[in-house]
Image (cartoon, rainbow, N blue to C red):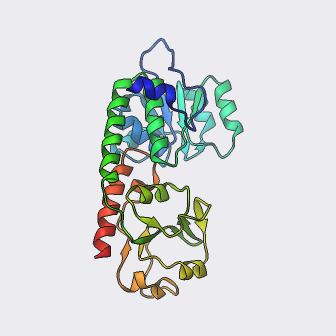
Amino acid sequence: MLGVSLHASQSAWAADNAPLTTNDSSPTVVSLSPACTETLSQLGMESVLIGRSSACDYPTNIVRLAVFGDFATPNIELLVRTKPDILIANRFKTPTQAKTLEKAGIRVVNWEGNSVEDYRKSVVQLGELLKCPEAAQREIERIDERMAQFDAMPALTTRVMCVIWDSPLMVAGKGALADELLRTIKVTNVAGDVPQDYFKCSFDWVLKHPPDIIVWLAPPVEWATHRFWGRLAAVKEGRVISGLNPDLVSRPGPRMFDGMEQLRKEIEDASR
């Protein structure tokens, strides 16, 4: 039951997550977190949004909203002038900005997440914060249903490396969202034991830990002529997954379940 979840859940959100009390039953919200913006839409609460970050681009109709800053970098002047009831954002690059906004009467809620469980807890807390517990409960049930589907899948022996960026080379290590998603679909992450979520590794490290399949989330490269990638068997044999929308596996929001389903299918196809 949702009531049990509300009492049991603890997440990386700010501790002050009590429901907002205003004269209007619909608070005004600015979201600087793409994952949160998607989640608000998933909960049917898109109408409370009056602003977004430059990185918030889904659902596509959300781009009509005013931009109140970049990811983790709010436009303080515009926010203070507009004064929404709530600002939801990832941790700011400049932590003191949160205090400035709070002094201006804007409630700042921290949205963090690097796992399915974090997303689940955040859904519960959004339901509490915005007084939409029924919508939150429906999303919790959808999460549980999708996770049960993944739990029923057989494990694959395929070793996968998820490349986040090419220059400098960065792959998903232990604790990254992509690592969690690979584990959920029962695939081994080559860098899953490296204690860095976004692991800046050398080409020598990759040669010593060659993947069976590469999931490429970085900008495109010319595989055949590249001085390094062309040396790997996964590239020579065409076992590179490069058409996946990075947002599906990099945002801890409602679409990551579709991302996992697509990723599992493409890994199975590439393994044949």
How far from the left and from the top, in percent, is residue 266?
31, 67
Quadrant containing the C terminus in the rendered view: bottom left
Image position of 213 with respect to 263: above or below: below
Query: Is residue 44 toward the left or the right of residue 210 in the image?
Result: left
The furthest residue to the right: 96
State the image quarter where residue 141 is shown. top left
* 13 is higher (above) or lower (below) than 230: above
At 35% from the left and 50% from the top, the residue drawn is 257
Foreground of the two, 153 or 168: 153
Pick the front one: 172 or 164: 172
Q: Is residue 204 left or right of residue 62?
A: right
Residue 217 visible in the picture:
no
In the rendering, at what x and y percent does residue 55 appear?
48, 49
Residue 199, image x and y in percent? Answer: 59, 65
Q: Nearer the viewer, residue 215 or 84?
A: 215
Q: Position of residue 4 (x, y in %)?
A: 44, 25
Along the line of sight, which residue is nearer the eye, 106 or 152? 152
